[in-house]
Amino acid sequence: MQEPAPQKIIIDTDPGIDDAMAIHQAFADPRLEVVGLTTIFGNVTATRATRNALHLAEMVGHPACVAGGAPVPLRRAPEPPADFVHGPEGFGNLPAPTPGRAADPRSAATYLCESCAAAPGEIIICAVGPLTNLAAALEHDPAITRNARRVVVMGGSAAHHGNVTDCAEANIWNDPDAADSVFAADWDVTMVGLDVTEKTRCGPQDFAVIAKQAPVIGGFLSAATEFYFDFHEAKLGERICFMHDPSAILAITDPHLFGFEAMPISVICDGAEIGRTIAGGVGRRDVSVAMQVDSDAARARFMEVVATADDRAAARHRESNLKTTVIGGWNAGRNR
Ligand code: BDR
Ligand code: CA
């Protein structure tokens, strides 16, 4: 039987250690075609997020477009980057990368709108950072609600707990106004929040396995994740990490691993509970909220996909060399 065509995806991201895991997972998964990466402040500054996204694509020779996004939230002063979780440059203790190519000149919001308009109903936007770019895209071209296939957000929590405050998850807390406008818009949204992302955990032994199977990409993720383990160990007393952003990718590729419930979602934008996601919102469309996960299967799936990352990168390099040779030769022939 013929394989279904890969699902097209743009990842809106603040890389970030678990963002790097999710992006390499998406690059390695043949069921996805990563069209682009749009970047956002959050775990690092927006400038570093763009640099890091370019580096992640370059590591595997991936042609994904990278467009730089908002450096600050819609309406409030920015919080400092989460360097105590992701390290000073975003990849734990690894040094700042120096990518060899530049970002697309368009803003993330413009890029999102133009890409979705050029392929109506085809592109899934997977947002794994604060939602400022998506809110800006809604302002820039409201037709994006029809042009995007669907939106998958890593953020929030239906069980009313948080990871920055008692009730606010980091991506929502960084720009609650933006998050609220994304949940209020008339498009197909899935929320993959702490309800499931904290249930799927990996430990150093899992990354040691990945590093053995895919020494370049797995090795990079394993080295970066040491810092992430330190953070979680200090918080939980256990050397593990939560698989936040990879869970959002899994909700696209392997939705059968999750249990979803439909409910409208609103975000508290002021007061003591700022950043909290709540079920409800008059006249709002239902959001599909991930409430259960088969965490062992989710961890296994993530590991299985990332284990193939080096082979996939090698195949991509071979393919692009072939294209250069064949197309270059063909053009040279024509010019003669
Ligand atoms: C989310 O916040 C960031 O620190 C992670 O990258 C993830 O997107 C988890 O709350
Ligand atoms: Ca993130």
Image (cartoon, rainbow, N blue to C red):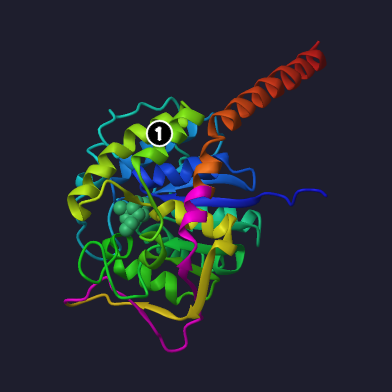
The crowd level at tag 1 (other Cα within 10 Å; few <14, some 14-19, many 20+) is: some
Name above or below for residue 225 compared with residue 118. above
281 to the left or right of 24:
left
* Relative to 247, 43 lies left or right: left
Of the residues shown, which amino acid type is indicated by label 1? Ala
In the image, ligand 1 is in what quadrant? bottom left
| Residue 10 in the image: above or below residue 135 | above
Rendered location of residue 4, percent (x, y): 74, 52
Image quadrant assignment for residue 208? top left
The residue beneath circle 1 is: 208
Splitting the image into 4 quarters, where does residue 35 fall?
top right
Residue 258 x %, y % = 52, 65
- Magenta stretch: includes residue 298: yes
Q: In the orientation shown, which residue stands out farthest toward the top?
A: 336
Question: Looking at the picture, does residue 332 appear above or below residue 100?
Answer: above
- Could you tell whether 323 is left or right of 1 in the image? left
Q: Is residue 9 magenta?
A: no
- The residue at the point 57 percent across, 62 percent down is 255
Closer-to-camera residue (190/321): 190
Q: Residue at x 51, y 69 (%)?
A: 189
Vertical arrangement, residue 161 with respect to residue 66, above or below: below
Question: Can residue 260 be spotted in the picture?
Answer: yes
**Residue at x-position 47% and y-position 83%:** 284
Q: Secondary structure at mark 1?
A: helix
Magenta stretch: give its range: 272-300
Q: How many marks?
A: 1
Image-based side of 15 in relation to 296, left or right: left
